[in-house]
Image (cartoon, rainbow, N blue to C red):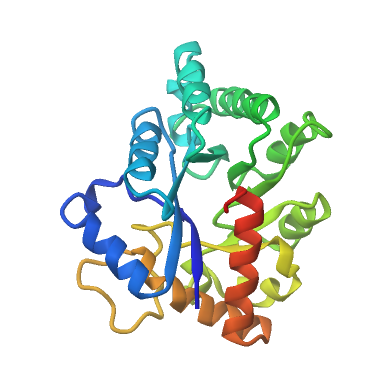
Amino acid sequence: MQLIDIGANLTHDSFDRDRDAVLQRARAAGVTRLVVTGASREHSPKALMLAQQHPGMLHATAGVHPHHAVEYTEECDAEMRALLAHPEVVAVGECGLDYFRDFSPRPAQRKAFERQLQIAVDTGKPLFLHQRDAHDDFIAIMKNFDGRLGAAVVHCFTGERRELFDYLDRDWHIGITGWLCDERRGQHLRALVPNIPAHRLMVETDAPYLLPRTLRPSPKDRRNEPAFLPHIVEELARDRGEDVAETAAATTATAMTFFGLE
């Protein structure tokens, strides 16, 4: 089983002590490629650096998460464009809207989102999207770019049926994480995932966040890591009524095509 983790925050400081060991465990678990999430001015360059240090295994995104939207200046826009000129950077984002936390004012979030959508138009690279409790504004902003954007994935999907079908109706991709394994918050996802076409479905850990609650044994430090992706795929396959190998092969093929990987 060969898997692609499309969203791992490997620049997070919790990996500083053992990042190489984390990658070794990922390989041993069958996670052959990872896309390192760039979500701020600080961490997007770090994601590129990691991808350059591990060619063929690591790739990167470059963007500014809505939590950091206040840092999106003209200088920041130029920095993101420069990062996206590198072949190792395979998507624009993580970008979008987050009205759950509101760590940045909503007008700043919307402006930063629009600026990054324009970068996707200009570069032709796919979008790595974030949306939480902001669905209607999210859709409205995306509609302003209809016909000009390439592929898009709503990463770490945790929403309800209406949101899922709005995304699928627009031919966007869906990223599923260990949220699926959370009996408190993710139970509704188990009934939704069979509706995602195989060619629109990808998998991710969002490490070090979202440790699957059904993982046994559970790491003492509660840190999620890419080596746990097969566990998510096993649960996803069960909920979709598929063989694990089928789900693994389909999500890997979809990710290869989406990110333009060789």
Where in the figure is residue 255, as x and y percent of width and height? 60, 58
Q: Residue furthest left?
A: 17
Q: Nearer the viewer, residue 151 or 215?
A: 151
Name above or below for residue 29 compared with residue 124: below
Name above or below for residue 98 compared with residue 42: below
Where in the figure is residue 227, as x and y percent of width and height? 36, 70
Q: Residue at x 20, y 72 (%)?
A: 220
Name above or below for residue 100 compared with residue 106: below
Q: Residue furthest top?
A: 74
Where in the figure is residue 73, as x and y percent of width and height? 48, 15
Where in the figure is residue 31, as x and y percent of width and height? 43, 68
Q: Residue at x 27, y 62 (%)?
A: 22
Q: Residue at x 52, y 82 (%)?
A: 234
Q: Residue at x 55, y 37 (%)?
A: 95
Asked where in the image residue 141 lies, by quadrant, the reply is: top right
Q: Can residue 102 be spotted in the picture? A: no
In the image, is 115 to the left or to the right of 216?
A: right
Q: Nearer the viewer, residue 163 or 116?
A: 116
